[in-house]
Image (cartoon, rainbow, N blue to C red):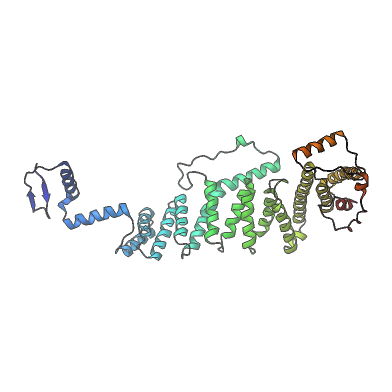
Amino acid sequence: MNLFVCAGGADKMSVARPSKLGPRAVATAVLAAALAAPGCQSYGKFKENTYKSMRSVITSSYQDPEADAKMAKAEQLHAAGEFKDAAEIFDDIADNTYNPVLMAEKARFFEAECLQKQNKLSAAAATYNRLLNDHPLGVYRERACARIYEIAYSWLERDTLAEIEASQKENKAGKAAPWWEKKATGVNISDKSRPTFDTEGEALRYMESVHVHDNTGPYADKALFWAGYVNFYRGRFEEADSFFTQLIDMHKDSKLLDAAIKMAIMSKNNSTGGAVYDSQKAAEALQLVHYAEASMPGYTSDKEKTALMTRQKLAVRMQLAEKDYKTAEYYERTHHPASAYFYYVLVCRRYPGTKFSDLAKARIAELEKVRVKMEDEAANPKPPGTFDSVRRELDRIVGKPVVEPITPDAATGPTPPAPPPQGGAQPQAWGNAGTMGR
């Protein structure tokens, strides 16, 4: 076969001698000829093009002597309003890790700016967030956080906040629509200004990212508040409590502190799961109520806020009272009457005037009868019967320890000491618990 090889220029074309080549050699020669065919470029040009092609496959980082010129060209395109072309150049500069850090950070920020001006908000938010991850202490950090907050809030305002506001109005009017009539959120295909899936979830994740990367910035408290607000109305009270608590602890000068305290108290009270679960959150809610009343004058002078705090305190106290009452019921159910008696008395002392206090008093009266019966049985034990004798003999045969019957003389014993004074009660002492209830 005859193969024509370009050896340097169009005027140096030569014809190879016919030879018998294997399939692999033929394929290699054809590939080389195809790569060098356009314009019969020189070997140096062919080598450069091959290097660039392989570099784009393996890595995007290389020593770029034209980086400054590319940056200037991209800035000119950005100023001229050609955002699509400018974004491609900015992306190439930012991806090249051989470029200076400040140049790469600037290029990434302006790439996101170009995407935002093209109304590709989802891609812009992702690019801003990538900037924060790659350059967490960079000079564009605060501006990137501001842009992310604006995009995330626009998503929430458009759908979620409008839905919550409409739902509140319907609830006040008593005309809440059933769940099957509510608007369903599906897949977004055509609108590039919003994420494809779960717009609300993406907005909440970006809100959290704003606080993580700039927790002392001007948008940190706002990001925490809206993240907690949406989670609260979606019924995710634990997440809402986390965001509101961070706002209260880290942003005491925020204008949103007042609203955050109110919603944090309700979030804590609703996140316990009920009286059978840990009551730590309910106790934290009561502590936060006391903090608000002591440190914020508005909660003592404003009648509406005072009424709100009173309702929240009653809700917390009812939950704590129910927990102690359930604990007493548990001890009574597992045949520990002394411990049950102790907790019933505790409910009466800590939560007077509640329905659980009335229920506890009724149970105390029943347990008093049990206590009297137990004392009578201990003072007047029954003589051992036939069945007891047979059981003791069987225990001796199998080697079990034998419990001897208590005679009336042994049951009487010495006179017991006087009970401790009021207030020195211990839950283990049945007699002390009886003293507490008197």
Question: Which residue is pictured at 70% across the width and 56% down the height?
Answer: 284
Question: As displayed, is residue 39 above or below residue 73?
Answer: above
| Residue 119 visible, this orientation | no
Return the x and y of residue 70 as percentages of the image width and height: 32, 61
Return the x and y of residue 329 as percentages of the image width and height: 79, 44
Q: Please count the marks in the image.
A: 0
Query: Residue 234 falls in which quadrant of the image?
Result: top right
Please name whichever residue, 163 or 342, is drawn nearer the observer in this view of the structure. Answer: 342
| Residue 142 visible, this orientation | yes
Question: Which residue is pictured at 51% across the width and 59% down the height?
Answer: 145
Query: Residue 2 falls in which quadrant of the image?
Result: top left
Name the residue at the front extreme: 397
The quadrant of the picture occupied by the N terminus is top left
Question: Which residue is pictured at 84% across the width and 56% down the height?
Answer: 425
User: Would you say 74 lies left or right of 50 here?
Assistant: right
User: Would you say 262 lies left or right of 360 here?
Assistant: left
Return the x and y of residue 293 as percentages of the image width and height: 75, 60
User: Would you say 85 lies left or right of 125 here?
Assistant: left
Return the x and y of residue 355 as percentages of the image width and height: 83, 45
Please name whichever residue, 434 or 411, is drawn nearer the observer in this view of the structure. Answer: 411
Question: Which residue is pictured at 45% across the width and 41% down the height?
Answer: 189
